[in-house]
Amino acid sequence: MSDAPFLVELLVSALIVLGASFALIGSWGMVRLPSLMERLHGPTKATTLGLGAMLVASVAWFQLAEGVWTTHEILVSVFLFVTAPISANMIAKVHLHRLRTGEPGEVRGPAGTPDAPPTGATWATYEAPHEGTPGDFVGD
Amino acid sequence: MIAGALAFGFAGLGIALALNLWRLFKGPGVTDRILALDTMVINVIGLIVLAGIARGSETAFEAALLLAMVGFVGTVSYAKFLLRGDIIE
């Protein structure tokens, strides 16, 4: 694998180092930050960006050094970029729900819990949609 | 140079996985553990991608794609179970 041009090696190496650094920083942030709402920031931003850099490095390496065009990495990156916010949103919803029901072990963040929605409903984590709550399909 | 970068990448992702394991054991809440598992899946995908570059094999990326899908489904189903007490309603 050492017969690639110097610039190709430099580009791929820089992308790999950047990606691994971001992944490490994201995981360190998840250990270091004090509450779950803050801990969500590290993995969902830094790790996804780091993985994106590593996937770009992989595409560039296989295209420029081995002459093979691969699209699996692009599929992986598109899938991760679509699903990472969804899973973060789900984790945040579980956190809010468990804060509201007073489960042990859930640490309240510095911002506290958000205000309830203005229509007298509660956050859509506990009850099924009924008339007057968001998602009741009235008027759709 | 590429070998050195790959060694740095493997070491960094290994340390990141160890930090995730620490958060997984420490908790304190269930949501922290879900987040730690989700991050571990992402770091393992990074390890698979780096192994694919190191070995020059494209079959590794099939595993990365499968792990991306299964990890997302696992995270969402665990969150749905904690929210509703049921996964498929």
Image: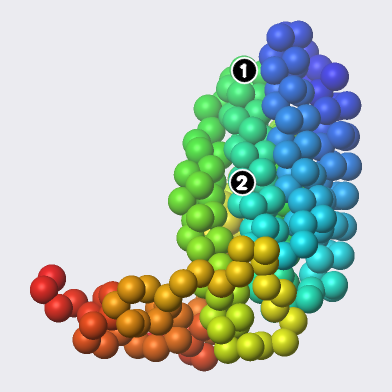
Residue B33 lies in what quarter of the image? bottom right
Coloration of the structure image: rainbow
In this rendering, position of residue A86 left or right of residue A118? right
Q: Secondary structure at mark 2?
A: helix
Circle 2 residue: A45
For image coordinates 18% across by 77% down, the residue present is A137
For image coordinates 50% across by 38% down, the residue present is A74
Q: Where A51 sits versus B76, above or below?
A: above
Judge by depth and name the residue closer to the eye, A11 or A111.
Answer: A111
User: Measured from the top left, where is residue A111 in percent x and y?
Assistant: 61, 63
Image depth: mark 1 or mark 2 in front: 2
Residue positioned most to the left: A139
The kind of residue tagged 2 is Lys
Circle 1 residue: A64
In this rendering, position of residue A66 left or right of residue A6? left
The kind of residue tagged 1 is Leu
Query: Are discs 1 and 2 less than 8 Å apart at CB?
Result: no
Judge by depth and name the residue closer to the eye, B82 or A1.
Answer: B82
Q: How many marks?
A: 2
